[in-house]
Amino acid sequence: MATDVILPALGMSQDTGKIIQWLKSEGEQVVKGEPLVEIETDKATVEIEAPANGVLARVSAAAGEDIPVGQVIAAILAPEEVDNKTDASADTVGAEVMDADAINRVPTAGASPLAWRIAAEHKVDLNQVKSSGRRIQKADVLAYLQNRENADANVGTRLIASATARLTRASPKARRLAFEQGKDLAEIKGTGPQGAVLAADVLAAAAQATARPAELAGVVPAAEMPVAMANGAGENDLAVSNIWRIMAERTTQGWTSVPHFYLVREVNVSRLISWREQVLKRSAEKITYTDLLVKIVAAALRMHPRVNASWHEGRIILKQAVNVGLAVAVEEGLVVPVIQQADTLGLGEIARRRVELVAKAQAGKLRPQDISDGTFTISNLGMYNVDAFNAIINQPQAAILAVGRIAERVVPVNGQPAVQPMMVLTLSCDHRAVDGARGAQFLDTVAMLVEEPLGLLA
């Protein structure tokens, strides 16, 4: 039985998703859990995985299309369904692109759905195509096109280049960059496993191509060439990524539609530092201050459920799960992967999940479940030597915690001045869901647990 591929909803405010690119071609074998298509949502660009083993068919959404959430965009056919429908493949897959003459040219060997589609698009008589196996495959049609002496040279070149790019080993992020920059993956030397093209390879190829004319003319070294393109007004236009555009739209919406207020608290982190030092001695994982804060914030959210909430259509919705999102900066912008059920996890498991999510974010391989259902967000800029800042709420959540750096300051201790390691925490709240008193109580609990982590045992 065929399994539908459905465009998922990753948040209450999401109505549509845009198809960025298909990572598998119609007619190709796919494995359950394998990346199938990249979509752009209101949160990030993510990969949708194949829901079953089989053959990709009935693709109804093309790159660039905005599709309503919940709509079927393709199907995964079981092997027996593909075999049973070989003779009728022209009617079931890609029939909309076939003309009457192509349908009448039925080859005796049969053909895969993708071979049918390519043949129909380029008016190829499949009876003239030599099959290399039980039936005609995509590669057979491409080989025929390549060798046909009187074929349209431009059409053949574009088709072969496109097919070669699909066959070239490359990461999803590399494919996306190559698509955006109009690069042929087959012409880029890959440095990844088994020669796979990585995002860095695409960027290096683009930089080399941009720099070469200037270098030959003796203008500037390649390293000094600007990335942006100059416009007619003497300014530089910098093309933004999909993730950056989504971030801009979401933060604009959040800032203009959510009534923010801010609560600030400076905390002494001497015991937090000692806690981390003790944990590092016992744990195989590299525990960071972010991991400790996830643990503390998750515990505080369980004690203050009104902060673990959202405002939706005039109602306050209390979330049952405590799912803590981490704001992660990547080359293309900002994404917020989520540590699910954070209040039930130990520090080692929190660290492992953080490492895994950050690696996926930086590689552009986040899955829908990696960024969905967040109930609270932590944004830590301490590693960039930021003392304090106000963060914009990540809708539809009710609050976000901004974390500054640890810095030594002179503070009173038992009535005497002393140098202590201090950190500034700033809580941004949605006043529709969290009032000042509840926000202050939550922040007080977080500060108390930072200054005395043993409080977690209670």
Image (cartoon, helix red, strand yellow):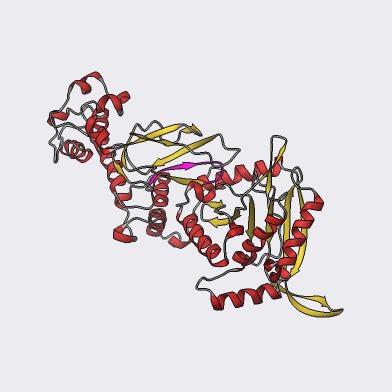
Q: Residue furthest front?
A: 458
Q: Is residue 149 above or below residue 280?
A: above
The answer to whether residue 167 is left or right of residue 438 is left
Quadrant including the N terminus: top left
Towards the viewer: 9 or 383:
9
Q: Is residue 187 above or below residue 289?
A: above
Q: Quadrant of residue 389?
A: bottom right
Residue drawn 46% across the image and 62% down it? 223
The prevailing secondary structure element of the residues shown in magenta is strand
The answer to whether residue 420 is left or right of residue 175 is right
Q: Position of residue 316 (x, y in %)?
A: 71, 41
Residue 402 falls inside the magenta stretch? no
Q: Residue furthest top?
A: 100
Q: Position of residue 386 (x, y in %)?
A: 67, 64
Quadrant including the C terminus: bottom right
Residue drawn 56% across the image and 54% down it? 340
Q: Is residue 201 visible?
A: yes
Q: Is residue 239 visible?
A: no
Q: Position of residue 360 (x, y in %)?
A: 47, 56
Q: Which residues are magenta?
A: 35-44
The answer to whether residue 350 is left or right of residue 95 is right
Q: Is residue 234 above or below residue 196?
A: above
Q: Quadrant of residue 139?
A: top left
Q: Residue furthest right?
A: 415
Residue drawn 77% across the image and 45% down it? 431
